[in-house]
Amino acid sequence: MTMSRRTVIGGGGIAAALLAGRARAQQPSTIAIGTLFPLTGPNAQIGRDAGHAVATALDIVNVPHPELDLPLAKDAGLPALGGATIRAVAVDHAGDPAKGRAEAERLVEKEGVVGLVGSYQSAVGAAISQAAERLHVPYLAADNSAPSLTRRGLRYIFRPGAHDETFSRAMFDFTDGLRQAGQSVETLALLHEDTIFGTDSANFQRRLAGERGYRVVADIAYRANATSLEAEVRELKAAAADLLLPTSYTADGILLIRTMRELGYRPKGIVAQNAGFSDPALYEAVGQDIVGCVTRGSFSLDLAHKRPGVAAVNALFKARSGRDLNDHSARELMATLILADAINRAASTDGSRIRDALAATDLAGEMTIMPWSRVRFDESGQNNDAEGLLLQWTGDGFLTVHPKEVAVAEPSFPMRWA
């Protein structure tokens, strides 16, 4: 029996349609990513806020938000993957690097996640990124700021935000501005926890102090999650530096301020390396004691005058959490959007393809809620177009006081101690 040309063409069309239908059927309707944050222990509120930040980002991806100029906001789901939605599998690393690594491995090998987002503590981020490298799954270091994380030759770590060298330069630019305005700021005290976060921060701040002509009169490392800081605060009080530069997570920061109050230690100012000093939980505990405290950061609600989407995104976040976006949750939200955008551009759930799509990211700053000029990663996975801010606590909230291009207020100095 012979087949006509019409029959062959028709049969070929049917076959092509069947193949296309099969390809569509093979596309996942839901794609899983893993999130790793502290959900128990002294930093649990950070983890809870992170969960709301990730959920807000996934709402922006999965449900059309035509009013937002953010990645994937206009459509429902991932267009390149047939409208597939993204879900998050959240785990608690409890601030333990070994647990962070084990949970990252489980998320990839057992839960089938195609990317990871985390993790607040840089020491935990270092462990997660090693697991991600071995498993060829990208890790978005949303709010890890230790510079060394992206200097270990790893290919699967990506950090959209700035690291502590960039932030420290902004902090010293701010203190230089105080001097130029006639304030007497000559001596510094460094206080830092003893993990990779505190150690990296102190090493660079020590170097900057020498370059900028400040005297470091105290340089104190303490054990993370300390139960007492009395000896350290007595040493700080005796040194009598003009400015205190703490690098501390939330529980340590609260303990520090309470101990300073008890021992009557009141420097002219505090210029903090973020972490606990950007956490609302710290200010809920001791905020009225430290009006005028300054912290470096990546985000403030008053950025709405530069990024119109800030108010709308904050409203989405607040409807879930009952809280405003802060420095940490804003970075966690944007990291999730950046990962989702890369999955869509990769048009794949293969980790290596998503990694390559992340490496090719070139996102205008206007497509974020951050004060960044762009998002594009260098060979190490660092976004060098991320800028830092200096935020001052007023007793009711934060105001951006540096740099001048985005500042909404002049800094108040010295601090008003309660």
Image (tube, helix red, strand yellow):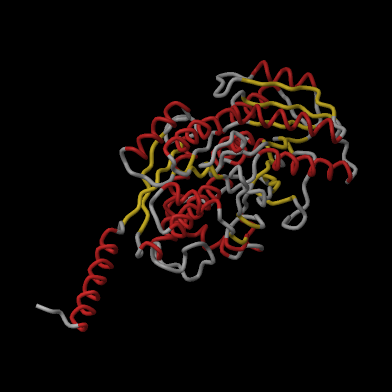
Quarter occupied by residue 373: bottom right
Which residue: 48% across, 28% down?
Answer: 97
Which quadrant of the rendered structure holds the N terminus? bottom left
Which residue: 53% across, 53% down?
Answer: 334
Quarter occupied by residue 381: top right
Work out which residue is located at the far front of the displayed protein and give it.
1
The answer to whether residue 157 is above or below residue 265 is below
Residue 213 visible in the snapshot? yes
Quarter occupied by residue 13: bottom left
Q: Position of residue 23 (x, y in %)?
A: 29, 62
Q: Position of residue 194 (x, y in %)?
A: 61, 23
The answer to whether residue 315 is above or below residue 223 is below
Residue 397 visible in the snapshot? no
Which residue: 23% across, 74% down?
Answer: 12
Which residue: 69% across, 26% down?
Answer: 191
Work out which residue is located at the far top of the displayed protein and give it.
231
